[in-house]
Image: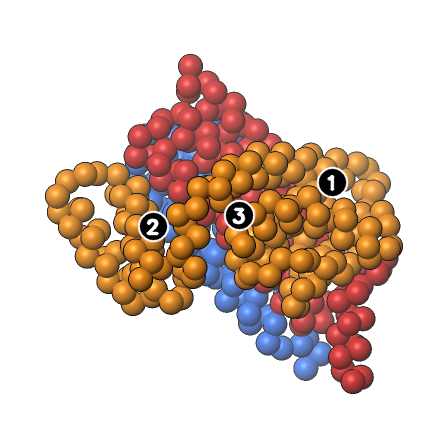
Amino acid sequence: MSEIIGIVVISMGVAFDLFGCIGLVRLPDIYNRLQGATKCVTLGTCLILLGVLIHSGGAMGAKALLCAIFILLTSPTGAHALARGAHKSGVKLWEGSVMDKYADDKEGELDR
Amino acid sequence: MANRIFQFLIIFILWLLLTWSLTVQEIIVGVVVALLLSILLSDVFVRGGGKFVQPARYFWFLVYLPLFFYYVFRANFDVAYRVLHPEMPIRPGIVKVRTTLKSDMAKAFLANSITLTPGTLTVDIVGDHLYVHWINIVTEDPQEETEVIVRKFEGYLRRIFE
Amino acid sequence: MIVLIILLVLCCFMCLYRIGAGPTPPDRTVGIDTLGTLVVGFCAFTAIITGKEWYMNVAISWALLSFIGTIALAKFLEGRGFDE
């Protein structure tokens, strides 16, 4: 029984991974791509690891749980670092964007 | 001192989970490694060790987790909708919101929570202000943006970390 | 089972497309980061199929190294502008 539930959870995880990767290909600029990729791939991989925990348990399950917690903590941090690095290295937002308070504030600092 | 004891406990439990065996030599090596690391690194990672023994914080953490996972799942369906829609209904931009949280740990968790919840991605933290990339801007009033993005987590995080 | 593997490989190829085609260096870095997270999932899946426990050790090490690599690349991007 637990094996079937595990496989179902893993399938959900793979589906979210697929959405995230479609977002990575389709969305227009780096910040939007980071949004799609980070959210969907993080949850998708966590669901795969959770499926491993449900499927087999024991030592493998404990390691899967640790790995899931680790990914849940580090993946958003990596996304902040990348977004900040991209903005500081001068990548512009997509032309359809509405506002960019970060760039406005940085220019204000330069004038002062 | 409290910092060191809690760091020792955290590292040792992590070691036990990773090795997943209770033989004597594994435990001895774990104790030695945890002692060394907690003596060398006590000032770097854990601050305010006294906070670890207040049960109310754990209670609020347990209340916070289901809320967090509810928003994470909503975020994923939101992204799936935007990605699979043929015209991609996005209206992105970077907005500036203000937080009332003070400690670094609480701010870090707030930033991570914002990144994993629907449509938002933290770009930078400067003092009390967070710069947030929002995939679908619904309002241009800073006060309302703060209400929408930050308020839902702030109360819980203040009870957990401050 | 085999369908899931094919879908995961398809995800990896999408990331490879982004690494190859991304117009700016940060875009490629996003692809590398996403690919690292996908490989962790793939290792866990392999662990289930083969029933060998040490694949999870590979997954944990890969997660750690992928995070460090992403942070290093992000710091590198932050340090310079592209018009220089």
Give the quadrant of residue A43. top right
- The secondary structure type at the circle numbered 2 is helix
- The secondary structure type at the circle numbered 3 is helix
Task: Name which of mark 2 and mark 1 comes first in the sequence.
Answer: 2
Q: Which chain is blue?
A: C
Residue B72 placement (x, y as % from top left): 62, 39
Task: Name which of mark 2 and mark 3 comes first in the sequence.
Answer: 2
In front here: B150 or C11? B150
For the residues tagged 2 and 3, is the chain the same? yes
Circle on res. B10 = 2
Residue A69 placement (x, y as % from top left): 46, 44
- The secondary structure type at the circle numbered 1 is helix
Q: Is residue A1 above or below residue C42?
A: above
Q: Write down the colour of chain B.
A: orange
Circle on res. B83 = 1
Q: Gap in Å between the C-alphas at discs 2 and 3?
A: 18 Å
